[in-house]
Structures are given as structure tokens and as C-alpha cells.
């Protein structure tokens, strides 16, 4: 049961509006026309705009709220967020806007009361579909540590729309399965000099790349989103072939030679090469950010959250 269905089930009447948010993942459900007596504790007035921040892989922060406020019309707004809210001393404000902001905790309390009073029935069978109650409970319960990580996007989807000449479009967040490799081994230099080292590499099968994982901004947890898998993983031989370029390096090496005029000291560049036979490869699950975007005349495409690249189908 999605949020619009829950509101309808509780007797909340909304007048659909043609309002488009330029902040991806936040949609206007309509104008509040009627509240049942049982929901008079909801702190909004008739005529308020009701918004829904859909599930996503990143919490809502101050910057995202400020971006949303830029295009919001004057009046009272009730924003119901299924995504975690970043702690703020005070949410951003506009003088002509009254904002009531509900996060997962407040939703959980509200829906829990509705369930206890019998206004909202919840199917407790094992095959229940994802509901707002599930989302709220998941936000309240700490998840056990995961062996994998999820990475925050490097691109802003709203800016991507502008660059591509698109109006705001329907989107759905998802995760792309990747691998984070830890490589441990010896670099062997001149005169059999050795240095133990380790490298972290990100294998992205959707971009067909493996590279050093620099400046990866990890999320606190892996969001419960649709996950897209790939069969385009590197095999052992391909991984080994990629390592020299990624791990090996040229370094200055001090050389002392004896000449006719005595000892001569100099520096030469030497390759330090990875000893593959003794190297240890450890893979770790990683998830990259992405969105499904419904493009007119093209249908659904996938926008890579790190590169902005458009993927028409899984690789």
C-alpha cells in the first residue's frame, strides 16, 4: 500500500494538482480538501499542499529542502518523507510558506496509532508488499552491519536534467552492483628492494572500468532499494592484467657509483612492480547510486550516479 492509497484509506481527500518539483524524488500528491475527524491532530489546514518524498538511497538534507522551496508555491505545505531527515536546528524557511515536515519516525507514530484504532488494516501474512509501515519500522530499527558499502552520488540529478535539456522527469532510485577489491602484495624495486602495500580498487561492470577508489563518499548504510546486477565481471586473468597499470609505479632510487674522480651519487627512476604470484585479492560488495528516468519517446533509461552516463539496458 503506497502513501496515496493509505491517505485515501484513512479518509484524506486530495485534489490532484499539476505541480512539478525540480527536486527528484519529491512529488506533489495534491491539495488537501478533507480530513476525517479521527485525523484532526494532523497539524495542517484545508487547502494545504501535500508532498511525498519517496524512498531513496540518500537522506533529505538542508540543501535539498532549500532547492525544493525555491519552486514551491506560497501557502501551507505538508511534506511527508519516507527518507531519513538529516538533523537540523531549524529547517529552511520562506516567509510566504508554512512547512510541516514529517520524517519516518513521525510517520511510524501516526500510522501505528491508525493501526491500533482499527482505521488502518495491515496484512500480517509473510508475503506482504512494501508499505509505508514497513518503511517507517525499517527506519526505526538498526540494521546489522553489512559486509558491503553503498556510495553517495557525485552528480546532482536536477543539474543533469538541465545539462541534457530535459524538464523534470519521473525517476526511481536504484543501486548498481559493483565490487570493491582490496589488493595486498609486495612492490619489488631495484636490487630486489621490497615494500608491502595495499590498494583499493572499484570494479564497475556497468561502465566497464576498474580504477583506484579515490574519494568515495560512503553512505551510513545500504538503502533498501531495487538492485541491478550485471554479468560483466572481470575474470581472474583480466583482473591480473589490469593491476600493473593501477598498482605499479616509478620511483626515484638513489644510486652511488664509483668513478675515476671518486664516488658519484645520483637518482634514477626505477619501476616498482607488483609481485602477482604472492598478491592477495579480496572482493567486497559495493553498490553504486543510479536512477531510472522515464524519458519521453525513449522510455526508461538508467542514469549512473557517479558518471552521469546513460545506460539503456543492463550490461
Image (spheres, helix red, strand yellow):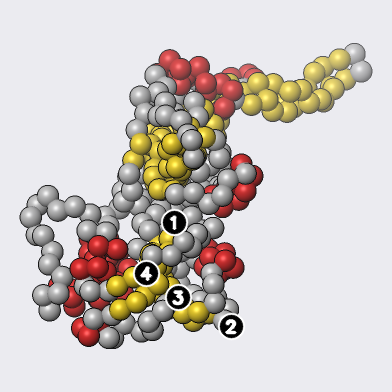
Say which element carries label 2. Answer: loop
Which tag, 2 or 1, sits closer to the chain's start?
1
Between the residue at mark 2 and the residue at mark 1, the CA separation in whole angstroms equals: 24 Å
Mark 4 — residue?
A: 15
Question: Within the image, what quadrant is residue 142 found in?
Answer: bottom left
Mark 1 — residue?
A: 25
Between the residue at mark 1 and the residue at mark 3, the CA separation in whole angstroms equals: 16 Å
Mark 3 — residue?
A: 77
Question: Residue furthest toward the left?
Answer: 125
Which tag, 3 or 4, sits closer to the chain's start?
4
Which tag, 1 or 3, sits closer to the chain's start?
1
Mark 2 — residue?
A: 95
Which tag, 4 or 2, sits closer to the chain's start?
4
Residue 229 in the figure: left or right of residue 191: left
> Closer to the camera: disc 1 or disc 3?
3
Mark 3 surroundings within 10 Å by alpha-carbon count, few (fewer than 14), some (14 through 19), many (20 or more): many
Amino acid at each position: 500500500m503506497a502513501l496515496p492509497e493509505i491517505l485515501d484509506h484513512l479518509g484524506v481527500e486530495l485534489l490532484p494538482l499539476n505541480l512539478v518539483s525540480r527536486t527528484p524524488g519529491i512529488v506533489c500528491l495534491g491539495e488537501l480538501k478533507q480530513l476525517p475527524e479521527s485525523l484532526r491532530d494532523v497539524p495542517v489546514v484545508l487547502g494545504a499542499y501535500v508532498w511525498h518524498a519517496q524512498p531513496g538511497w540518500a537522506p533529505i538534507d538542508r540543501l535539498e529542502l532549500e532547492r525544493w522551496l525555491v519552486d514551491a508555491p506560497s501557502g501551507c505545505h505538508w511534506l511527508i518523507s519516507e527518507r531519513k531527515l538529516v538533523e537540523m536546528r531549524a529547517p529552511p524557511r520562506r516567509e510566504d510558506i508554512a512547512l510541516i515536515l514529517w520524517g519516518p519516525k513521525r510517520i511510524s507514530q501516526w500510522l501505528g496509532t491508525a493501526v491500533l484504532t482499527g482505521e488502518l488494516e495491515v496484512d500480517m501474512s509473510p508475503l506482504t508488499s512494501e508499505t509505508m509501515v514497513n518503511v517507517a519500522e525499517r527506519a526505526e530499527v538498526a540494521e546489522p552491519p553489512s559486509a558491503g558499502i553503498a556510495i553517495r552520488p557525485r552528480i546532482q540529478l536536477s543539474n543533469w536534467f538541465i545539462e541534457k535539456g530535459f524538464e523534470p522527469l519521473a525517476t526511481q532510485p536504484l543501486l548498481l552492483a559493483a565490487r570493491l577489491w582490496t589488493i595486498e602484495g609486495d612492490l619489488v624495486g631495484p636490487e630486489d628492494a621490497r615494500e608491502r602495500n595495499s590498494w583499493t580498487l572499484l570494479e564497475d561492470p556497468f561502465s566497464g572500468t576498474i580504477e583506484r577508489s579515490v574519494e568515495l563518499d560512503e553512505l551510513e548504510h545500504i538503502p533498501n532499494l531495487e538492485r541491478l546486477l550485471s554479468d560483466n565481471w572481470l575474470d581472474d586473468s583480466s583482473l591480473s592484467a589490469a593491476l600493473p597499470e593501477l598498482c605499479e609505479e616509478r620511483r626515484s632510487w638513489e644510486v652511488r657509483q664509483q668513478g675515476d674522480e671518486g664516488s658519484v651519487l645520483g637518482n634514477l627512476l626505477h619501476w616498482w612492480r607488483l609481485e602477482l604470484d604472492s598478491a592477495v585479492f579480496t572482493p567486497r560488495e559495493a553498490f553504486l547510486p543510479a536512477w531510472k528516468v522515464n524519458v519521453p519517446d525513449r522510455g526508461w533509461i538508467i542514469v549512473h550516479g557517479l558518471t552521469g552516463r546513460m545506460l539503456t539496458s543492463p550490461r
